[in-house]
Each structure stands twice: as structure tokens, then as C-alpha cells.
Image: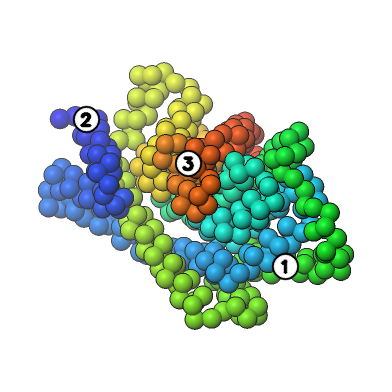
Amino acid sequence: MSYELIAILIFSSMLLMLLTGQRVFAAIGGVATLFALLLWGKGGSQMPFNASFALLNWYPLLTLPLFIYMGYMFSESGIASDLYRMFHVWMGPIHGGLAIGTMGLMVAVSAMNGLSVAGMAIGASIAMPEMLKRKYDKIMVTGVIQAGSSLGIMVPPSVVLVLYGMIARQSVGQLWLAGVFPGLMLAGLFILYIAIRCKLQPHMGPTLSLEERRQISWGQKFRLLRAGIIPLVIIFSMTGLFLMGITSLVECSAAGAAATTIAALAKRRLNRQVMENTLRNTLSVSCMFMWVILAALSFGAVFDGLGAVHAIKSLFLDRWGLSPWGVLVMMQLSYILMGMFLDDTAMLIIVAPLYVPLIIGLGFNPIWYGVLYTITCQIAYMTPPFGYNLFLMKAMAPKEVTLADIYRSIIPFVLVMCVGLAIVMLFPQIALWLPELYFG
């Protein structure tokens, strides 16, 4: 049997296991170990074992639970509620102002956690009831929250970029910096779309009533600005100190987690229940990611041993005759297709060990490609039939928001993301300028 046929057999076996509903780490890691034993005998088990053990010696892995902890502490302690109140008051007088304020909240949440789940939970529990109560179009509301929460995997400290850095063996610090301007650009494109849409169709995002605006004095408005101080302090204690060279990657995650906990304590909201919920959720998500990464490295080790990367390169370049840019476009399309059925971690596990060496061989920058991958994940998060964010929104939304509404709501935002993806592909320096400036 040829190596190409064996690689196809391994890949199809893994997909079949995933379709049976098995846990991602069990399906992928189990297939990798089984084929290692079949191909290389008893000694083959050392391949996935050694690849997995290398992860446990990787010091930056400590950042993973700390960033997850930050996101849950920020949500559970109610600091996010204070921040949304500030956006609500200041942005309410303009059409679509609450939706724009929600997008601002999502950017702040993204800068203090690395997952889209935290942003989705905060948006659905805090922003959605306020906007629906003020007659915002429910389709607009659900689209705003889904698109805004997807920024959590782009804006540092992105956990997805940390995972990409682990699997692709790239600098997490450079990946974070590469995600700053593309993430802010996407947020700006979302805000621009909301402002134009609500300007043309005022019923989509009505302003706050005159009575509500009169109830809040200018003194109260300025006092509400204090809600933005805590998030800025947290972001500075983490990202700011890291960029200044005062803290390392792991130290900045610990500083951010400590700052979030101190902020909750200063607000007198750090009680036993908040701490228990935060730690329980952090432990659950961190363990899930650990198992998935272990499986990913095991699978990648077996695939590397077969030379599957060279087989894929030969298929794209020799047999199909694609140009390097054609190969890149094919990769992005494959991510979107897989994103209809898998989450971002599973996609990264399946294709990163194959695509990243090919990207480097074609002369593309792997840091830039990590940003492209992450934007494509954002698109895939909201793509039917099984987009991750679609079902999260359905689980959190009120009964009047149907699944059909949720599917309709993401169409314009997915188109905006496609525009953003094209811009970053055409102008790589949007992603690469900051890491090149900082790291020289």
C-alpha cells in the first residue's frame, strides 16, 4: 500500500470517528495511536507519546488556564455589566448606538479573555435583553452578538492563536501582535456596517427615548466612564507590560489573572460562589484543551512520519498545477467547509500539521497565515449548518429568536468578514507590521 493511500485512510478514519459523535481528542488521538502501532509495530507507540510529552515540557502552556480564568472572572464578577452600562448610556442617543456599544464591549471582553464563549455569554445575558427591550430588530441583535463574540479568538490574548502557536511551533507573542490590527479592523468594519444600516433603516436600531436620556445627568454620564478604567488597567497589566518587555508571556497572563481578581475584590463582588463558578469553568475548559492538543500532536507526528505533507504539496502543485496563491485560497475554502461541521480546535488539529509546513515551503509567512486561519475560523463559527456560534446563540437567546432568525442574522456579518479576510490577504503588513516593529 502506498504512503498516499495510507495517509488518506488515516484521514478518512479520523473523520469517520468524528462523525460518530466521539469526543474530539479520543477520535483523533485514538486513530493516531492505532495507525502508529499498525505501521511501525510496538515501537510506533513512542511517536505519539513523545509528541505529547513535548507539550508538557512547553512552559508557555501555563498561559492557557490563566487567560481562560480571566474571561470567566470578568463575566462572573459583573465587571462586564458595568462596562456595558457605560456604552449603553453614551451610545444610546444615536441610531444603532446600543449595537455599536455592544461591539465596543465585545472588543474589551476579547482583550481580556481568549475565547468567543465568554463574549457570547456576556452579550446574550447583558446586551441582548437591553436591545430587544428597546425595539431593536432581533435579527440585527443576534448578528451583532455573534460577530462581536467571534473577535475573542482574534484579539490578544487569543487562545486559538496560542493553540496555533503550539501546533505550528510559532511565537505566540508575534501571533498576538499580528492579531491586533486585523481584529480592530474587523470590529471597525462591523461598526461601519451597523452605523450605515441603522442610518438607512432607523427601525433596525432606534435611539434611546428622550425621557430616558433626560433621566441621566451629565455628571452621571461622566461618572459612568469610570467603568472603563478597570478594563484598561487589566489590559495594561497584561498586554501593556508584555509589550514593554517588563513581563514574559506567562508572567503577563498571571498579571492579568491577578488584576482581574483584585478588581472583583475591589468591587466587593468576589465571593465563594463567584470563585467556585470561575474555577470550575476554568478547569473544565483547560482540561478539554489539553486533551485536544495532546491528540493533535499525536496525529501530527504520525502524519509527518508518513510524509503526508509532501504528498499534499505534490497534489496541489504538480497534479493540479495550482499557483502558491491558488493553494492558499484552497486552504481557506477547506477551513470554511470544515467549519460547517467542526469547531476551530478540531480544524486546527486536522490541517495545521499538514498546511503549515506547506505554507512555509511556498514562501508565505506562518505568522500571517495564523491570522488568516483565525479569521477563517471566525467565518466558520457562523456558517450553517453546524456553526459553533449559531448553536451557542440558540441556547442563550430568548424563545422569540428562532434558529431561522439566527441563520439570517449572520449573512451580512459573514460577508463583512470575507471582505476583511480579503484585505488581510492582499495587504499582509496589516498583520505583520506590529510584530516586525516590536521584534525587529
Name the residue carrying label 2.
Answer: 5
Residue 73 % position (x, y): 54, 70
Q: Amino acid at mark 2?
A: Leu
Residue at point 30%, 35% (across, down)? 308
Which residue is nearer to you in this view: 29 or 354?
A: 29
Residue at point 74%, 45% (across, down)? 206
CA separation in Å, label 3 and label 1: 34 Å
Please indicate whether residue 268 sits to the left or right of residue 332 in the image. Answer: right
Which residue is nearer to you in this view: 401 or 332?
A: 401
Pointers 2 and 3 in contact (C-beta within 8 Å) = no
Residue 127 % position (x, y): 63, 56
Name the disc covering residue 177, or none: none
Name the residue carrying label 1.
Answer: 227
CA separation in Å, label 2 and label 3: 41 Å
Q: Amino acid at mark 1?
A: Ala
Residue at point 45%, 36% (across, down)? 384
Please indicate whether residue 300 sits to the left or right of residue 395 in the image. Answer: left
Residue at point 34%, 35% (across, down)? 309
Please indicate whether residue 391 sits to the left or right of residue 84 in the image. Answer: left
Which secondary structure lies at badge 1?
helix
Q: Amino acid at mark 3?
A: Leu
Q: Quadrant of the N terminus?
A: top left
Residue 281 % position (x, y): 44, 67
Which secondary structure lies at badge 2?
helix
Q: Is residue 174 visible?
A: no
Residue 135 drawn above or below residue 337: below
Name the residue carrying label 3.
Answer: 403
First in sequence, mark 1 or 2: give its number: 2
Q: Dividing the picture into quarters, in which one does residue 58 lie?
A: bottom left
Give the crowd class for mark 1: few <14, some 14-19, many >=20 residues within 10 Å. Answer: some
First in sequence, mark 3 or 1: give its number: 1
CA separation in Å, label 1 and label 2: 59 Å
